[in-house]
Image: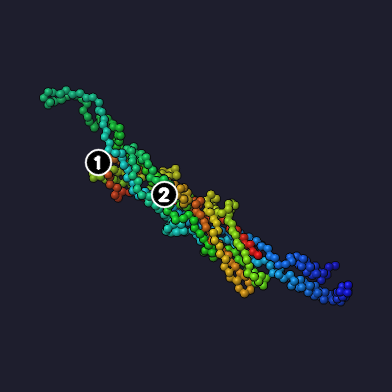
Amino acid sequence: MITLKKKLGVLALSAAMSIPFGSSAHAVQTSGSTDIKVNLPDIIILHYISDITLNFGSDIGQSADESVASWTVAWDGATSDGSGELAVGNLDDTTNELGAISNIDVTLPNVWAIRGLSSDGSATVAITGGNATLANGTSSIALSDFTVSGSGNTSASITADLNGLHKTTATVGDVNLKMNVSAAALSGEYDTSGTEYTITATAI
Amino acid sequence: MLRIQRQGVFLRSSRNGGVLRVLLLAGVLLVLFWPALSFSAPAITFRKNVTLDDMRPGDVFSSNSAAQHADEGYFEPEAGWSGDVGQDGFGVYDLSEVYLSLTFTRWVNDAESNRAWLWRYRQQKNEHPSRPSFSVSFSIEDEYGNPGRLSHQSDPFSWVGASVIDDAVADESNNRRWIFFGSARLEFNLGNATRSGLYRGVLTTTLTYL
């Protein structure tokens, strides 16, 4: 039977045996884990061009050969007779013919860009401009149907990828519009003062 | 031989006296080996979680607005009468950088929710009379096991680089105990983050002490 005193004796002896002789300390490591959380806000960076001037070619001289015509002319010059007189309805087209002066579809490539952070990584990009008119005296060019293109979408309001903050991963997009030059009779600069479009980017 | 006989007599004579003798023996051993016993383990506690202060736009931009913009100047391309414009407004490498830095830092004790020390070391001075010496090291990984990053709560492909760039130890010892609190300063890199919201990871702190 093991008595209490024997137990205590064994305990004391065991304690003594387990204690290293001398006081040389050795390094001890203890590790612990901490869950770390940090919250990032929505951020949008919009790049835009504030001044756009489109130069439609240089001075162009166009000619059209309207074929052969013959007239009977009196020696007194008073009368003539024949066919092939030029009229608005029978003029031939020139090389750079504007046709029926219909709208010209213009795409301004890479004139806006977005980047940043949002909850799903994308943003809405919208353009407003209404029906703007560029004037040059009594002559004018009408602008309409503004849309934006980016991330494979084209509309007045699209969803585009933000792709983070780094500029090399930005989504770059186009602006599309229609120009009606049917009322443009003068060459020269058509005033842009007060005529603008606005692009707005909003985090989703 | 005589001593043993005496001991035997003693043990036979009194049960309580035997117990007392064993306790005395244990006491002698305790005194003899006190220097070694004095290296008893300190009480070390690690913070279970830390929610850092939210990142602010002002951490990386010159203003604190979340809506930044950059005027890239003018564009004067040649256009054809068919509407074609054979020139880009800009390329991505032409863009203004806008941000001042893609990194920001936080001390763990910046946390608003639980102004936190990261670890705490406590030890009785009578157990360890000399000032404890220790070193601290850190490692971070996200929930997918990727080292050096925190990942977005719903998109593993959106992550922020994370590293400990500084640490601090506060000594709040008193007459009876050594008490130290540890803190760390983390740097986050936003170069691979595409989403706003919560990013998570695990910071492992290792204390090595004598």
Q: Position of residue B27 (x, y in %)?
A: 76, 73
Label 2: chain letter: B
Tell me if A177 is positioned left or right of B186 in this view.
left
Task: List the residue tagged with mark 2.
Answer: B95
Q: Residue at x 24, y 32 (%)?
A: A88
Residue A94 in view here: yes
Disc 1: host chain = A
> For numbered disc 2, what is the local secondary structure?
loop
Q: Are marks 2 and 1 on the same chain?
A: no
Residue at horizontal 65%, vertical 71%? Answer: B129
Pick the quarter of the image with the N terminus of chain B: bottom right
Q: Secondary structure at mark 1?
A: loop
Q: Position of residue B31 (x, y in %)?
A: 74, 72
In the rendered image, which quarter contains the C terminus of chain B? bottom right
Q: Position of residue B164 (x, y in %)?
A: 55, 58
Indicate left or right for B73 with A159 as reference: left
